[in-house]
Image (cartoon, rainbow, N blue to C red):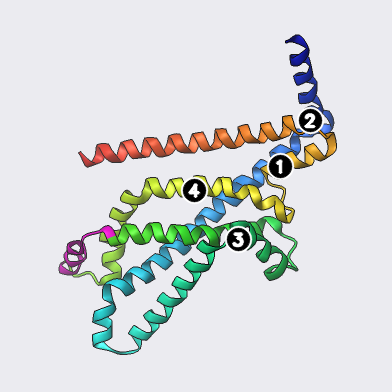
Amino acid sequence: MADWLEKLKSDFILNFVEDNRWMNITRGLKNTVIITIFAAIIGVILGLTVAAIRTTYDKNRETMKKNGGIGYWVMTFLNNVCKIYLSIFRGTPVVVQLMIMFYIIFASSTHGVMVAIISFGINSGAYVAEIFRGGIMSIDNGQFEAGRSLGFNYLQTMIFVVLPQVFKNILPTLLNEFIALLKETSVAGYVGVTDLTRGGYIIRGVTFSAFMPLVGIAIIYYVMVMLLTHLVSRIERRLKKSER
């Protein structure tokens, strides 16, 4: 037992203390947090936009078609673009999307973190869009009619009447999507971005010791996910209390 503890201590010193190798972990953790936060922001904005277009088309298609005009054709075009976007980004692996972004679309860019943010943000937006769309479609049509009776147009009804209810209903699911996004960023190292996972790989490549750096980054991911999961649980309990 004493020999095992001594070996564990020497492995810890070798992998994290010598030559300040722990800085690879902190640098990678910083990039992971930055990528996750900004990708989540892009995902929410993009997802809400796509969901608004699709639900507006679904709820008003017959009325717009009956009235005619360019509005119907514009919404039909935008709805089809959104469906293609959702199909592509939900139907292909995120790591493939990341490599296409890095090696083809942004091949001349030297800002790997920015490319990763855009890639993960666009991917997350496809899933967030369906979360928002499900939330909007679950709202009773009477809420839209109530907004109209107050003198709101469709956009105002959506902003002031529908979306507050939608956010309350989908918030736990949305936060779970952010947890999944945090774990998905671990593939950023495939394109040379020094995220948390790649920070561990760099240490392993120098020390030729796999156990300590890989277990270390696994523990850090686990702690972050548990903290976010605890946050989701607390929010869910608060929402349940507010409904009573």
Relative side of 133 to 218, left or right: left
What residue range appears in magenta? 138-149
Which of the labelled discs sits on residue 15, or is there none?
A: 2
Which of the labelled discs sits on residue 27, or is there none?
A: 1
Q: Give percent across and percent down for residue 6.
A: 78, 15
State how far apart marks 2 and 4 are (Cα): 30 Å
| Secondary structure type for disc 2 | helix
Q: Earlier in the sequence, mark 2 or mark 3?
A: 2
Residue on which the image places disc 3 = 119
Point 34% across, 39% down: residue: 236
State how far apart marks 3 and 1 are (Cα): 20 Å
The reply to whether the C-beta atoms of the residues labelled 2 and 4 are less than 8 Å apart is: no
Q: Earlier in the sequence, mark 4 or mark 1?
A: 1
Against 139, residue 88 (above or below) is below
Task: Identify the amino acid type marked 4.
Answer: Phe
Task: Identify the amino acid type marked 3.
Answer: Ser
Q: Locate residue 146: give its quadrant.
A: bottom left
